[in-house]
């Protein structure tokens, strides 16, 4: 009898190992298809299989999955990144496996189309314009008014997203996005958006069920690099109901009724405003926070859905979990990082994880790749969790040696 396998299209430095581990716990052999398997060292460490494939090519993925189908019992196909999720949906459809609607995923991943559909459904979103050149950007800013957020029309992980307070900042970032410097996934189109100010929340959903709502804040402007996430968010019943209602209406408007999603929302003067809908699990370590706070393992439940098994989103208990991202303040070479063991030994600290090792270059890009690690803590109360987390973070120190310039 052939081995049951789960095919994972590409991986990620934090969520990837969790998917591999969860698949193994469910009795599945995880097989990661990647354009560069060497970037995922956890696969070999966890006895998974990695295969080099052009993951930008649907035909190449179909060919490799067909080859694997002759060797394994392919129980399901999934992925964790926006860049491959539409192809994951098409692969599931091609091989008649459970999966999301490909058209819904593609609509959601196109930021402009997403906003058009949300606006048509009456969902509150920031004012926005789409621009293809500097003149159109200037016109959009004049209509919306400063400050504005400039972002690529397609992409993920806050890549290329910047808050601009002045005309000069707008001009500089528009030049960057429209030129050849920014690595983009589509033709150069820019979304110019109103800056919706207020607390930032993420509603985590599976299918048509809101699992919970998380509070998040950012490192510092002008970029949107996460600094801390806390689950569940401290909300009144009315606030929770309004955020959940807006999130579910957004998913309905986009046709996202299968699998994990997360809806990013700002609570503004006019109430909840949808910033973005993502047709996947939120980036790490969010799923870990949900599990620590409520006992719901979203990654395992997602895999169950992918392989056609019954899932379970029942809340087991009520804790507060929080994660602090370790974000550097300068570029250079990580010389050393200390205090990790001491921080990990504090009662209530669940994990201290580093993404980079000493003697590794650190280059800030203003997106999800900036963090060099995270600390996670959990306890029965919010105040206790905050105190534990801060105590642990205060013990961790690092030194980054600036890159030498030619003049230096």
Image: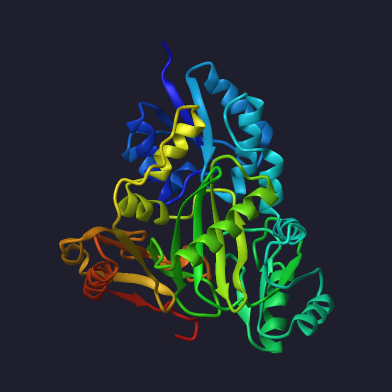
Q: Which quarter shows the N terminus?
A: top left
| Residue nearer the viewer, 390 or 187 | 390
Residue 28: image location, x then y, percent:
39, 27
Q: Which quarter shows the C terminus?
A: bottom left
Residue 106: image location, x then y, percent:
70, 47
When the figure is inspected, residue 392 is found, relative to residue 5, above or below; the finding is below
User: Taking the image as drawn, is residue 303 in sight?
Assistant: yes
Kindly identify the residue that appears in the image at 33 percent across and 63 percent down: 322
Residue 15: image location, x then y, percent:
42, 49
Kindly identify the residue that appears in the image at 22 percent across and 65 percent down: 340
Q: Quadrant of residue 46?
A: top left
Kindly identify the residue that appears in the image at 32 percent across and 47 percent down: 295
Q: Is residue 302 shown left or right of residue 296?
A: right
| Residue nearer the viewer, 80 or 407 | 80
Residue 246: image location, x then y, percent:
60, 59
| Identity of the residue furthest to the front in this view | 238
| Residue nearer the viewer, 235 or 330 | 235
Tally the numbered discs. Answer: 0
């Amino acid at each position: 009898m052939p081995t049951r396998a789960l095919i994972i299209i590409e991986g990620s430095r934090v969520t990837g190992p969790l998917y591999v581990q969860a698949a193994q716990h469910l009795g599945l052999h995880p097989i990661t298809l990647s354009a560069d398997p060497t970037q995922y060292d956890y696969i070999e460490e966890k006895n998974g299989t990695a295969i080099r494939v052009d993951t930008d090519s649907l035909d190449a993925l179909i060919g490799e999955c067909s080859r694997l189908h002759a060797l394994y019992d392919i129980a399901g196909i999934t992925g964790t990144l926006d860049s491959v999720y539409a192809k994951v949906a098409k692969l599931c459809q091609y091989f008649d496996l459970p999966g999301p609607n490909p058209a819904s995923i593609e609509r959601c991943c196109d930021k402009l189309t997403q906003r058009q559909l949300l606006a048509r459904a009456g969902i509150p979103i920031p004012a926005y314009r789409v621009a293809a050149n500097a003149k159109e950007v200037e016109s959009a800013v004049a209509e919306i008014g400063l400050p504005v957020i400039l972002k690529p029309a397609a992409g993920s992980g806050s890549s290329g997203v910047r808050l601009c307070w002045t005309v000069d900042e707008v001009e500089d970032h528009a030049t960057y996005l429209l030129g050849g410097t920014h690595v983009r996934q589509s033709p150069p189109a820019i979304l110019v958006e109103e800056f919706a100010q207020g607390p930032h929340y993420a509603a985590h959903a599976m299918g048509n069920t809101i699992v919970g709502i998380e509070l998040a804040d950012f490192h510092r402007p002008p970029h949107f690099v996460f600094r801390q996430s806390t689950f569940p968010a401290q909300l009144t019943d009315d606030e929770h109901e309004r955020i959940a209602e807006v999130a579910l209406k957004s998913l309905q408007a986009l046709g996202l009724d299968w699998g994990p999603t997360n809806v990013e929302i700002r609570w503004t003067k006019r109430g909840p405003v949808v910033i973005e809908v993502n047709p996947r699990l939120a980036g790490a370590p969010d799923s870990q926070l949900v599990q620590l706070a409520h006992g719901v393992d979203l990654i395992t439940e997602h895999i169950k859905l992918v392989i056609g098994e019954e899932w379970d989103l029942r809340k087991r208990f009520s804790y507060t979990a929080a994660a602090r991202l370790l974000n550097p303040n300068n570029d250079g070479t990580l010389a050393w990082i200390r205090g990790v063991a001491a921080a990990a030994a504090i009662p209530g600290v669940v994990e201290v994880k580093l993404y980079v090792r000493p003697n590794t270059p650190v280059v800030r890009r203003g997106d999800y790749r900036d963090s060099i690690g995270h600390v996670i803590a959990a306890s029965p109360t919010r105040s206790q969790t905050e105190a534990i987390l801060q105590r642990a973070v205060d013990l961790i120190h690092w030194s980054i040696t600036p890159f030498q310039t030619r003049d230096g």
